[in-house]
Amino acid sequence: MKIGYSFWGFLGNGVTDTPDGGRSHRRPFIDALLARGHEIVFLQPDRDRLEAGDDLGGPYTFDDGLPGIDALFLEWRWAIPGRNTTVCGSEGHTCDLHRQAQLINHYTARSQTPTVIWDKDRTLRAESVWRRTAHTRVCEAALAPTLGAHSLLFPVAEDLLAQADPLTLAARPRDLTLGYVGNQYDRDEPFDRFFAPAAARVEHLVAGKWAKTGRWPHVRFAGRIPFEDAAGVYGRSLATVLMLPERYAAVGQMTQRIFEAVLAGCLPLAPADIRFADRFVPKELVVRSGNDVLERLSYLREIAGTEQHAALIAACVDRLRLFGLCRQVNTLESVLHGLLQTTATERGAA
């Protein structure tokens, strides 16, 4: 089918000073859809070319109009005051929200085009009309999505899992005991409980946008780093802590940080209040306090480079199969086909 795909981000490395977690999984996801014979047309600007100066070429098509499509797929955008809620053309304005409104108005509301909303940031209101419209479906990157929504996790390519060699990763020298790559957004509470106490005792590094850090003077913040450098931080780190906003933790929505870390051989410690924590990591990597983090780090330093260390990495790699790319593409195709059948039936009845 021909899918109109709306996303605000990058397919390549993009630019350093812009957050976009989708860079870790968006391109493989799209490439897999193309490989299955779907036609994809991107309906937001080509930010790789316009902002990063990166002309990806290849099979990627961008259209700033309203082309004919079989289905609309939206990586859901939300209002960000002072950025996408301002007047078009004003300083600092981004037009992602206005463009999304135009797409929904034309395709979803007027043409009743089958529409799938991937609410990756859990910002779509529970009472949204799009949760109860016959020709729309909502997907969430959670193991326990909102009632009526489908579980579509952030995907990781199976070939990356196959290439991860636990023995090689365990043998890699690591000068950091604890590392983290990611932004501050709504993570102060788990940072206070799990990361900051350990950071006072071990070599560590935090990369990403952390604007308010005065309460943690002992923590080494490196600021934003290029997207492609994240693997280097995790490759130097023995372990990380999976810190999630509460709205993610409550429904078992794990971010891409888990496979960025694991594929670099960095062991993820998961706070026990993350729902389904033991589905994301082995039970011995589930922690309940800052003291727990320190105890696990001490143990991991003892076994670093051993077969026990490699076995833990292997167990973490195995857990990543939950996010397997083929599995997630199958989910989206199933949702799309069901939606197309429902829409066709309704139109026939009309």
Image: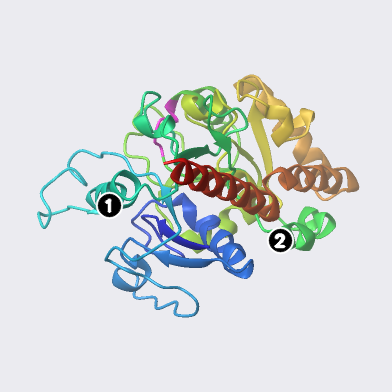
Question: As drawn, which residue projects farthest toward the front?
Answer: 349
Question: Three-letter amino acid code at disc 2?
Answer: Leu
Type of residue at label 1? His
Q: Does dot 2 land on a helix, a strand or a loop?
A: helix
- What kind of secondary structure does the magenta stretch mostly adopt? loop
Q: Residues within 10 Å of mark 2 (few under 14, many from 20)?
A: few
Q: Are marks 2 and 1 in contact (CB under 8 Å)?
A: no
For residue 304, above or below residue 226: above
What's drawn in magenta, residue-wise? 184-188
Q: Nearer the viewer, residue 214 or 163?
A: 163
| Residue at 62% in and 44% down | 258
Rendering coords of residue 96 (x, y %): 27, 52
- Taking 49 as reference, is 173 left or right? right
Spatial CA distance of label 2 from label 1 is 39 Å
Query: Is residue 168 shown above or below 128?
Result: below
Q: Does residue 55 appear in this view?
A: yes
Residue plotted at (68% across, 28% down) = 277
Question: Looking at this rendering, what residue extends furthest in the right direction?
Answer: 307
Which marked residue is nearer to the observer: mark 2 or mark 1?
1
Considering depth in this image, is 126 or 294 the residue closer to the camera? 126
Report x, y in % for residue 52.
35, 70
Q: Is residue 278 left or right of residue 308?
A: left
Answer with left or right where residue 97 lies relative to residue 179: left
Residue name at image x 35 percent, y 62 percent: 43
Give residue 106's mark.
Answer: 1
- The number of callouts visible is 2
State whether residue 118 appears in this view: no
Residue assigned mark 2: 160
Quadrant into which the C terminus falls: top left
Q: Position of residue 187 (x, y in %)?
A: 45, 30
Instruction: Tell me the SS state at disc 1.
Output: helix
Query: Which one is nearer the viewer's eye here, 349 or 140?
Result: 349
